[in-house]
Amino acid sequence: MVKRWQKWARENELFYLFSNNRIAQLAALLAFLCVAGAALSPWIAPSNPYDIASIDIMDSLIPPVWSENSDTRFLIGTDDQGRDLLSAILYGTRLSLLVGLLSISFACVLGVSVGLMAGYLGGRFDAIVMRIADVQLSLPAILTALLIDGVARGILPREQHDSLMIVVLTVAIGLSLWVNFARTVRASTFVERNKEYVQSAEIMGMHPIRIMLVHILPNILGPILVILTVDLAVAVLLESTLSFLGVGVPPNQPSLGTLIRIGTEYMFSGEWWIVIFPSAMLIIMVISINVLGDFLRDAFNPRLR
């Protein structure tokens, strides 16, 4: 069994590169801890920061346990509402990752579908899609997300804003990130379209959709995986930025961006922990995901090794 494992490890190039890259291993460990902490937050968090009945306003602004006037119940202190900051960070990370994963999945499906059709069909459809992509690339992603979010808020009834805000954020962030997938998949499809296996499938009379999904898509998964990893960090940052600006998730369900916004109001009055710890969590998570994305990019592109 051990020999089989060693043989598989030698033959699997991606695993071999990962096992010899300490920085990628550290980034993977940090990313795993962030994701695990967020996923298990209902079980490992000391309290539920969304439960109003468990919050006491008299516990507000308590410093971390190593400071004076601290409370052993709150390891890294409390915020302005008396919520345990560690619990709020775990639940906030869970919400930020949920919105990031949903939005990047939506962007991936949309961008890959459009890129496949543009690269395989070409012609007028390709020209229209690429002009739309060029226009969107001229605008920062945050402005696109703000525009879509504002339009959605104007269309939806006011009483439904809070209940549908995660859906609105998912669509807004997804529509601001689909271009990277579409352009990369289009370029890769152009290359694969002229290869013999695609021409053989066309001669056999296969439907174009089957050719794109069964023959072309599996051969361009490498670049898609790289963009998926890198843009996940971008999606989390976009969600945090929107929440920091006050147009993200509802205030009763704070994400990391909301916690950072609250913390900036108390930073110069001495309550530094309210902004430092959520910011550190966001920085660690984003950097670790970006490092993994860079590793995958180098692993799938031999010219960059």
Image: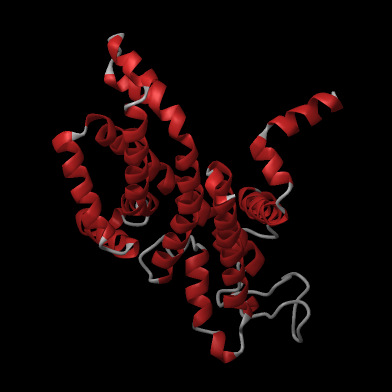
The structure residue drawn at horizontal position 45% and vertical position 52%, both measured from the top left corner, is 231
**Quadrant housing residue 91:** bottom right
The structure residue drawn at horizontal position 47% and vertical position 68%, both measured from the top left corner, is 258
296 vs 91: above or below: above
**Percent from the top left, x then y, of residue 245?**
38, 71
The structure residue drawn at horizontal position 45% and vertical position 58%, both measured from the top left corner, is 234
In front here: 202 or 46?
202
Residue 181 as seen in the image, left or right of residue 2: left
**Percent from the top left, x then y, of residue 254?**
49, 63
The structure residue drawn at horizontal position 57% and vertical position 66%, both measured from the top left corner, is 283
The quarter of the picture where the N terminus appears is top right
- Residue closest to the far right: 2
Q: Is residue 293 visible?
A: yes
In front here: 245 or 295?
295
Residue 122 as seen in the image, left or right of residue 6: left
**Quadrant housing residue 220:** top left
**Quadrant housing residue 279:** bottom right
Count the labels in the image: 0
**Percent from the top left, x then y, of residue 199?**
32, 18
In front here: 186 or 273?
186
**Percent from the top left, x then y, of residue 2?**
86, 27
Coloration of the structure image:
secondary structure
Q: Can residue 152 be seen in this view?
A: no
In front here: 81 or 20?
20
